[in-house]
Image (spheres, helix red, strand yellow):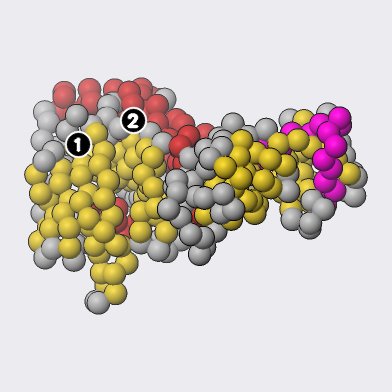
Amino acid sequence: MPKLLEVIDAVIAYGREPVVHQVAFGLEAGRIGCLLGPSGCGKTTLLRAIAGFEMLAAGEIRMRGQVVSRAGWALPPEQRRVGMVFQDFALFPHLKVGDNIGFGLRHLSEPERRARVRALLELVGLAEYEASYPHQLSGGQQQRIALARAIAPRPDLLLLDEPFSSMDAELREQLAREVREILKAEAVTAILVTHDQHEAFAMADEIGVLSRGRLMQWDSGYNLYHRPANRFVAGFIGEGELLPGEVLNDTEVRSELGVIRGPVPAGCRPGCKVALLVRPDDIQHDDQSRLHARVVAKAFRGAEFLYTLELASGTRVLCLAPSHHDHPLGEALGIRLEIDHLVMFPQPGQQQV
């Protein structure tokens, strides 16, 4: 299927210093993408280039097959049919909610404009607030009005720059799910920028993880968690620890937690040293197990405790266990490994064939 958006080996530089390095990905119409990464990784800079506010030093950006940016040239933002939702929502305080939403609909007749505004107010669940002013709404309500205003002109692409950053973590994830439903109802193609992986998982179909201006992996949230492409993605997504291991053969790796079976990295010979990714849900509490680890920290999460466990070597791992069983610090906890997705990386300097 043709891509609505294609970013092709994009390079963005400030002076002679590149801040985005040959990033490439595509997004089909109706899909929601996300640029995810820590502060300073280049995700907002890349979003601004897609919008037309930053110039490319190399590469191209295409929309519906047409080049909109290349080195030294960019189609002006107002000609790209791109909508934006900013961190501060940027609602007009002197305009009522209905007028905020209808601001970009001046090309429509008055009856058409009123119908579109009413339809969007119904869609975002705020039909009764058409005559209210932005300051009379909660932060979450303002966010939905800003979204309605952005999608009112039916842009080809909607860009959302950290739109939930001013809200607490629980509300951010809830709003991300609500925004996803709204965008899917309107069949809007969108890209979200965030540093919060829970937001990304709740909202996006595809997620690109960036580090220091480079795209580490563009994939589904499921694959980023269970099949990370490299150590950075494995460490940034979810929680987990990298344990040392040694390849025994094509299907077995020895570790402090025992022999683990699964596909080993391509080209790793027997004896190859690897780092094995172990997630909290890979370690099961089992009183019958001969393998024990000492509880050194714990965090209550309602239905579960997240335990930090210390192995005999001093290596620490995480374990999720039902909160019905409250184990004190210092207790030796019986554990067993239950890994459905074996992820490992060759240690630096290991010879491969």
Q: Quadrant of the N terminus?
A: top left
The alpha-carbon separation of the residues under discs 2 and 1 comes to 18 Å
Q: Secondary structure at mark 1?
A: strand
**Residue indicated by mark 1:** 3
**Pointers 2 and 1 in contact (C-beta within 8 Å):** no
Residue 82 horizontal side relative to residue 88, left or right: left
Residue shown at the point (65%, 38%) measured from the top left: 260
The percent position of residue 59, horizontal first and vertical second, equals 17, 58
Q: Nearer the viewer, residue 137 or 155?
A: 155
Residue shown at the point (19%, 37%) measured from the top left: 4
Q: Is residue 130 positioned above or below 300 on the image?
A: above
Residue 251 sits inside the magenta stretch:
no
The percent position of residue 344, horizontal first and vertical second, equals 55, 47
- Is residue 299 at all visible to an observer of this figure? no
The percent position of residue 254, horizontal first and vertical second, equals 67, 46
Residue 281 sits inside the magenta stretch:
yes
**Residue indicated by mark 2:** 183
The three-letter code of the residue at mark 2 reads: Leu
